[in-house]
Image (spheres, grey):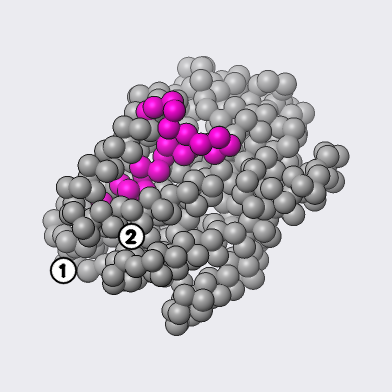
Amino acid sequence: MTAAAPNPTFIPRLESIRGIAAWLVALFHAAQAGYAPGRPLLGGAPDWDAAGWGAVWRLYVAVFCNGHGAVIVFFVLSGFVLALSLSREGALTVRSAAGFLLGRVLRLYPAVFAAVPLFALALWLAGRDVGFGQIVRNMLLVAVDLNGVMWSLQVELLAGPFILLAVAVLRRFGVAALAALTLLLLGLSFAKGWRLPGVDGFGLVFCFLVGVLVQVVVRTAAGRGGDRGRFGLALVSVAAFCAARPLLGFASHWSVVVEALAAAGLIGAIAGGACPGFDRVLNSPVARFYGRISYSFYLLHPLTLLVVWSIPGPLSAALAAGVPGPVLALVLGVASALAVTPLAWLSWRFVELPAVALSRRWRGRGGSRPTAAATAFPLAPARSRHYLVGTRQTTEPP
């Protein structure tokens, strides 16, 4: 079978990856539900270290609960698709750079403007104090204490100039210079001083440059390697992604590096041409649907945690009745994800799409379908101390 060259403007299978990752984030957060004070399912379930079910827990966490790894995949993916977008702009000028940054603002902020008041209302109904100034700061992404997952949107905005710099370096000095810049930012990510106050994960900007490097490889080697070669690369990349944190440590920064490389391999394999096995899954209607709504799904799914994280009694009773911890975590995750899906679709349909259309008009782009760059966004679990106001949860298994 002849490999199909990738579409330079939109790669549906990459959009589907976002939908799958959105589910991973939802499953990860649902597994943090507590069944007793200070006892979350993730890391604290009665059968966490038990023979048999303990091994199932480890497998469940590695395959379905690597929310932190999801952010790495999506930062790399953002760098990939945004670099493709800039490659179609021709010469990189002040005007095109300004249009690129404006496009990022118009892509990210409208959904945030719609989501933050919903979180404020939900928290107010739950009896928590939410001030007007706090709402405004969250809507501007100056603060993320109403919805902790928005920290990744802060990083996405800050990464915009770095992506422009990477593309400029690539065009002026070549791939070697871009690789050197990427390695420099990777090295800085290990430095404690390489951070911005109030912005979790600023050091992860190197992931975007990894994505820029991947698009160079894909553009120059599309269709090569054969279908089996791309399948093998994708399979190895997924295995490395799942094994990184269990083997290197859930808090190890080296796990991040491995996940970035795994993301690069997976994105390169999927975007480089036909990838048997993976294509069937990524082209399925369900994957495509959740790929389309994945930004709103990601942004809004923490609303369900107000319920999932507030029912220790029923969870404790289920565990006492013999329900295995991994099964209970999976049920919570699936139920919460399905519950938020209709709201996510409404946000996508009536907030995201109009904002994308507006951005295209302002930037002088015709057409009605958003490009891959227009639909790129990061996915990440919360890393701030307060995921929701007044709520503290562990974000890593011990």
Q: Nearer the viewer, residue 163 or 110?
A: 163
The quadrant of the picture occupied by the N terminus is bottom left
* Residue 380 x/y as whole percent: 51, 43
Q: Quadrant of residue 28?
A: top right
Q: Nearer the viewer, residue 101 or 328?
A: 101
In this view, the residue farthest toward the top is 50
Q: Amino acid at mark 2?
A: Ala
238 left or right of 36 in image: left
Q: In the figure, residue 199 lies in which quadrant? A: top right
Task: Give the residue drawn at x 72%, y 51%.
Answer: 136
Would you name the residue on which mark 1 appears? Answer: 2
Q: Is residue 65 above or below residue 35?
A: below
Please name the residue shown 25% across and 53% down the image: 169
**Label 2 Cα neighbours within 10 Å, binned few <14 / some 14-19 / many ≥20:** many
Mark 1: which secondary structure? loop
Which amino acid type corresponds to the residue marked 1 in the rendered image?
Thr
- Is 13 inside the magenta-drawn segment? no
Q: Which region shows up in magenta? A: 190-213
Disc on res. 83: 2
**Separation of disc 1 and disc 2 at Cα?**
26 Å
